[in-house]
Image: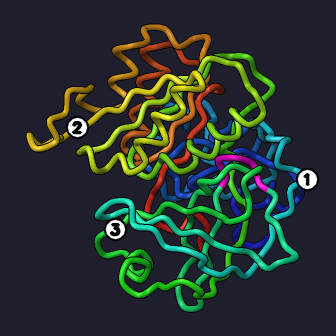
Amino acid sequence: MEGDETILEAGLRHGYTLPYSCRDGVCGTCKGRVLEGTVTYGKHQESTLTEAEKALGMALFCRAHPTSNLIIESREVSAVKDIPVKTLPCRVQKLKRLAEDVMVIFLQLPANERLQFLAGQYIDILQKDAAPRSFSLANAPHDDEFLELHVRNIAGGEFTQHIFTKMKERDILRFKGPLGTFFLREDSNKPILFVASGTGFAPIKSIIEHALHIGIKRPMHFYWGARKLSDLYMLPKAQEWEKSGIQFTPVLSDSPPSDNWQGRTGYVHQAVLADYSDLSTYQVYACGSPVVVTAAHRDFTMLQHLPEDEFFSDAFTFAPKIEK
């Protein structure tokens, strides 16, 4: 360990690709066990790491700092090991507003560069005078002429405000990536449930398009939750996947009468609970707001018997996933 490194940072620096996503103590992806040694737990969401789990030796490796030599137990994600993390310039090729508060950005890399990544990973947009901003890649790896980002306009968010009011085509940005361990585990034959809220659609889109491209035949069911109909900003795309055998269930939580919505209502993870009484043989990929991802993890594992290691997530914390 060097300086004030977390367990995750030290592991990554030494070539161990430990699972992680939010790096903010929210999603729980990096949770592992400390077999020997002591740690400080760092700031985290209490529901993600409970006192009972700490008593059993569990820690969030993205937040925990060692106070002695350690022996830890963690899953290692081997599929990202040989993918280099790069820092590259890119040009804003196109801006496309798909909803009142959703902008799609297409980024073009230099002519001699391509970004190798796994479907579901994210990049950090680097800023001169502010912390990086993390955005999932919405395009599949085989469709890499442009990098596609889906950005929600967050109240009080300086960078997202810039995107919606000042950013223009041909602007130059810098980014670091790919990052994260939210990607499709292709070595499994289990059926898959995808659960997205809002712009959590972006990495799910990347994963589904990749799965269709390589011909994965596992049963797949995609749930997309939003407040109102216009928030399902790429609804035709999701409906198009149905023709390829992807089951699709949109769920609206606060649809106004003007939507004339005849579909499912309520919270998206509760729609899954209503449809599947036993998830013991499934994999789940969940992405979106922390409250949705946290609730899905809790209820799927505790109530529907989903194995802990078959829940993969990326919680959008609307904050940098890597702190400087």
Q: What kind of secondary structure does the magenta stretch mostly adopt?
A: loop
* Image coordinates for residue 87, horizontal then vertical, percent: 77, 76
Residue 154: assigned label: 3
Please give the range of residues in magenta: 117-121
Q: Nearer the viewer, residue 23 or 112?
A: 112
* Residues at marks 3 and 1 touching, judged by CB atoms closer than 8 Å: no
Name the secondary structure under disc 1: loop
Classify 10 Å Cα crowding around label 2: few (below 14), some (14-19), many (20 and above).
some
Q: In the picture, residue 307 is in which quadrant?
A: top right
Write down the residue under mark 1.
82
Q: Is residue 198 left or right of residue 104?
A: left
- Looking at the rendered structure, the kind of residue marked 1 is Asp
Write down the residue under mark 2.
253
- Looking at the rendered structure, the kind of residue marked 3 is Ile
First-in-chain label (3 vs 1):
1
Using the rendered image of the protein, determine whether residue 124 is visible from the camera's viewpoint. Answer: yes
